[in-house]
Image (cartoon, coloured by chain):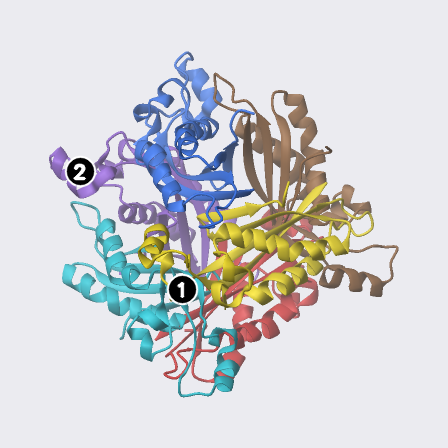
Chain colours: A purple, B blue, C cyan, D red, E brown, F yellow
Amino acid sequence: MIFLTRRATFSASHYYWNPAWSEEKNEQVFGRCANRNGHGHNYTLEVTVAGEPDSVTGFVVDLKWLKNVIEREVLAAWDHRHLNLEVPEFAAIIPTTENIAIDAWRRLEPSVIQAGGAQLSRVRVYETPEIFAEYRGEA
Amino acid sequence: MIFLTRRATFSASHYYWNPAWSEEKNEQVFGRCANRNGHGHNYTLEVTVAGEPDSVTGFVVDLKWLKNVIEREVLAAWDHRHLNLEVPEFAAIIPTTENIAIDAWRRLEPSVIQAGGAQLSRVRVYETPEIFAEYRGEA
Amino acid sequence: MIFLTRRATFSASHYYWNPAWSEEKNEQVFGRCANRNGHGHNYTLEVTVAGEPDSVTGFVVDLKWLKNVIEREVLAAWDHRHLNLEVPEFAAIIPTTENIAIDAWRRLEPSVIQAGGAQLSRVRVYETPEIFAEYRGEA
Amino acid sequence: MIFLTRRATFSASHYYWNPAWSEEKNEQVFGRCANRNGHGHNYTLEVTVAGEPDSVTGFVVDLKWLKNVIEREVLAAWDHRHLNLEVPEFAAIIPTTENIAIDAWRRLEPSVIQAGGAQLSRVRVYETPEIFAEYRGEA
Amino acid sequence: MIFLTRRATFSASHYYWNPAWSEEKNEQVFGRCANRNGHGHNYTLEVTVAGEPDSVTGFVVDLKWLKNVIEREVLAAWDHRHLNLEVPEFAAIIPTTENIAIDAWRRLEPSVIQAGGAQLSRVRVYETPEIFAEYRGEA
Amino acid sequence: MIFLTRRATFSASHYYWNPAWSEEKNEQVFGRCANRNGHGHNYTLEVTVAGEPDSVTGFVVDLKWLKNVIEREVLAAWDHRHLNLEVPEFAAIIPTTENIAIDAWRRLEPSVIQAGGAQLSRVRVYETPEIFAEYRGEA
């Protein structure tokens, strides 16, 4: 079993805001992230698939294919976007690094399953070099 | 003469939009950056001062002082902010990396001049690790 | 389950020395690290907690809280310190990267347990970008 | 249990080519990597061993020893080499990142087993900062 | 005056060999780089242009244009290539980092001159993170 | 003219202390750096030489030679050392990043002059990735 990872980056805006709370409560919990004009990050996304290298190509998956899947399923929707305002899954849930990792998984998994052979193993999202969240699917 | 540099980071949103142009023209020139919901970056700011090390302390400037100047003059206004909507200098000019570097210089220079001894030598702003702009003041 | 990581850095001195050994034996085993004037590193500490994102905040833990825990429990004791001379746990055991990772875990775990919800999952310590040790607790 | 990692780098050439295929088929599958003049990379190799820190030295393994093993078993054969033309294991299999990780494991494991105490736990190979493969041995 | 930089990467093979010398002399001077099977690197190219930001766009140059120039003039010829065997300028001169920087300048300068406005200011080439060469044109 | 740079790293301890001052004054000015048990850093040293590439070798200088000069003149004295206690030039002056850059220049320049051909152009010292000092010799 080989774990093969491809990294990609995207730039996006977001804010943290719970509409059920008062402005004071939002600012108390979320601090500067509650600013509803938004702020942004250069996110780094690491997508790991697991499988056996094909005996003919030496590939677990074709990395050009994986790059295309990441661009089509994730970057096309998220890059140079405001996550709260333009990405449907973040209308109702807050786009924390944790939730971004889970939704990247949900966006990527069907294409990996459909391709067959390798499994989606891990998605890691860096909000900054100091903060990252990792999701490995439901146990 | 020693050139002493302190690096800092901030996260902000921005967009590129010229109000004198049509939407089509803005999208043609600025591409995805014209999305007025905004997108964002983890910016890295490098501030360089030049001077002789003090014979008693060995410092060109006290780096704790320089860090405080950067935080008070730049990060307090820009970090976790939407540059177009919340920073006065970017109401009229577009917050490109070039203009961000010039305005960081303008914000920092008075404090460095007032402190005496060292000169502001260079300001470099990274929008991403792949793109950066550098300003050295007016010749 | 999400694995959420926060990175921090600290600068410290240390040396490797076993008082039960002769100077020759120490130098033979530990090489330049046996220099008892000490040498130092910019250490990077990665602390990973695991849990479900809270349905209201989207947080596994509040990263400001985690940052404060790391500063209070680890950095306050280790940053800008000589590990052998000033940190009690390294009076009797050698502050190798391995032992530093274990002791960071021991310092952090009670606060994570007390907070409830998330578990301490992994502590990784980089002595340099080329060398790092990881501890995942006993079990 | 501590997981201790040492990173090393090597520069090598390679190409992707399946001699059972036509030139067209090779170019269709492998794209620019099928250029048989070769192209190259600065590879980064991360070798992780797992074990208990020795109570006397604080070491899982002596990192000078591990560095020497990596240099003797891997870098001496691969660094500044053309992997397809000069490395026996890549005469018959294609030197993809996946296969490079597996062969690094095969080259390193006997020395780690012979030394006793710690186990080889993980080998990770970065072809570029954006692409890496990880092998953890046969389950 | 603003100095605006765009970074790009390419992967290539090369060797160091002076055909006027014996094999012994080549190996004595060039060491492992004299291996004529070639070895390779992930090169990083930094291209800096200097000029005034346009008052309407805020751009010194359009970075999409600069990216395209780099891809068309440099990467199309060098990426995934063997520099000695496939790049005309390196048939007669050795593709050291120094010469690669000079030739990147020669390839880029006509497009920058033709575009008008900004000047090519600096080309920096990293062979590895530890080694880089910079060319600023003929004085 | 080409500017060719080689990077090296060393790990060392230091503290900031002016013996003419009281303990209070030292702590007020130097903060945690005044701790006389010492603390340490992984320093990165960048040494830049300037010259014309040799028409036969393509080298400004032989980088193996430059690496050896850096190791012999700087790293042998500074790596795994306590700068205040073991390095003569820092007995009387404080080993700030500024002074370390100046002394690296003084240690390196005679060898570069003696070799002929290229000139020492710049020495840059990173104390951390966030702080660096650069010296270009006396104007």
Res D93 → quadrant: bottom right
Q: Residue furthest top?
A: B20
| Foreground of the two, B31 or C71 | C71
Query: Residue D24, percent across and down?
Result: 66, 47
Q: Amino acid at mark 2?
A: Glu
Give the residue drawn at x 66%, y 68%: D87
Q: Amino acid at mark 1?
A: Gly
Q: Is residue D13 left or right of residue A84?
A: right
State which quarter of the image contains the C terminus of chain A: bottom left
State which quarter of the image contains the N terminus of chain A: bottom left
Give the residue drawn at x 63%, y 32%: E121
Q: Is residue C15 left or right of residue F99?
A: left
Circle 2 sits on which residue? A27
Q: Is residue A22 above or below residue F21?
A: above
Q: Is residue F7 above or below residue C100?
A: above
Q: Is residue A48 left or right of residue F88?
A: left
Q: Are marks 2 and 1 on the same chain?
A: no
Query: Residue B109, percent across and down?
Result: 43, 30
Q: Is residue F58 visible?
A: yes
Asked if the residue at tag 1 contacts the one at tag 2, i.e. Cβ–Cβ closer than 8 Å, the answer is no
Circle 1 sits on which residue? F38
Q: Is residue F89 above or below residue D116?
A: above
Query: Residue C38, percent across and down?
Result: 44, 70
| Foreground of the two, B23 or C102 | C102
Secondary element under disc 2, as helix, strand or loop, is helix
| Foreground of the two, E5 or A45 | E5
Query: Residue A14, percent across and down?
Result: 29, 36
Q: Residues within 10 Å of mark 1 (few under 14, many from 20)?
A: many
Q: Is residue D125 visible?
A: no
> How many numbered discs sit on the rendered protein?
2
Whole-Å distance between the Cαs marked 2 and 1? 41 Å
* Comparing labels 2 and 1, the label whose residue is closer to the camera: 1
